[in-house]
Image (tube, rainbow, N blue to C red):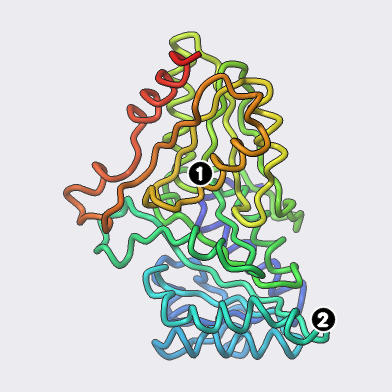
Amino acid sequence: MAEINLVEAVNLALAHELARDEAVVLLGEDIGANGGVFRATAGLQQRFGAGRVVDTPLAETAIVGTAIGMAAMGLRPVAEIQFSGFLYPAIDHLVNHAARLRNRTRGRLACPLVVRTPCGGGIHAPEHHSESPEAMLAHTPGLRVVMPSSPARAYGLLLAAIRDPDPVMFLEPTRMYRLFRQEVADDGEALPLDVCFTLRGGTDLTLVSWGAMLHETQAAADALAAEGISAEVIDVATLKPLDLPTILESVARTGRCVIVHEAARTAGLGAEIAASLAEEGLYSLLAPVQRVTGYDTVMPLSRLEYQYLPSVERIVAAARKTLEAS
């Protein structure tokens, strides 16, 4: 067991699957000789060869299109897009082909594809390197959307994503890559997809979040605990399909819910969760659901970046507001 950060956990999971399954192939820009822009694939081409870890041209449409063909023919490609803001040229392939291949062929072909991409702000990058596109991807039937929040979660969920028979969008929060270290065992044990993880029990309200915002959300839970407020913290982890029963069970215990995400507010996944709570958990709620989100603007450049991202203070304020309502 080693103490590693999130980007090292991604590397560890990729190496494990390359060694375990000869059908696994990695492809992307600069992932081989250079080890990727964030070094997530460092050393893998030297270890497994250029035929398994493939440097591609700077052409996201070609990367994902090629990977879909590989998947349809029995390989398990893991494609890297350097930043999620560069994903859009490949959306045609993802929506019209990867997500529909099983349905289109009436089950004759599957698409065991993983597309990895860094996402979110917090590293002082230009705006096209700070996207949070999870809601757009989750709106596409046939795509599974996963976002880890810690090294251990990244390792286990990436193993599960690679082994899944259908396409998975694996969004890696850039800010979390080197934020902290955690002990992770390279034991090949996958974590379950399609479930939320309860990180902290509580009785007064439920805090729901995913990805990098779990860092601020857990800090907010600590701040609330210092005031005598017990907050349950849920890591959604798999954004599509959503494990709504876990959230409903938590809200049935606490009666209140605050949802936190850094993506823009309008039509974000927080709205989907809030609507689902209104439909199926209304009688459990003692107060309106609160959302703490990014704003309906392009992510600003570095000087204002942390004015955009939800802060501990904003989360605590939303929690107090829902506690004041009755």
Quick one: label 2 or label 1, which is nearer the N terminus? 2
Q: Residue at x 72, y 73 (%)?
A: 19
Q: Residues within 10 Å of mark 1 (few under 14, many from 20)?
A: some
**What residue is disc 1 on?**
181
Instruction: Report the front residue among 19 and 205.
Output: 205
Which secondary structure lies at badge 2? Answer: loop
Judging by the rendered image, the residue that carries numbered circle 2 is 107
Q: Is residue 285 left or right of residue 20?
A: left
Q: Residue furthest left?
A: 303
- Residue 100: x %, y % from top left: 67, 79
User: In screen coordinates, is 234 left or right of 17?
Assistant: left
SS class of the residue under badge 1? loop
Please determine whether, in this image, residue 127 is positioned above or below residue 323: below
Q: Amino acid at mark 1?
A: Arg
Of the residues shown, which amino acid type is indicated by label 2? Gly
Q: Which mark is residue 77?
A: none
Proximity of marks 2 and 1: CB atoms separated by less than 8 Å: no
Q: Percent x, y for residue 1?
A: 67, 47
Q: Nearer the viewer, mark 2 or mark 1?
A: 2
In the image, taking residue 98 as reference, residue 105 lies left or right, namely right
* Residue drawn at the location 66% of the way across and 32% of the way down: 281
Q: Position of residue 181 (x, y in %)?
A: 51, 44
Q: Give the Cα distance between marks 2 and 1.
A: 41 Å
Comparing 290 with 211, the one in front is 290
Q: Quadrant of residue 127?
A: bottom left
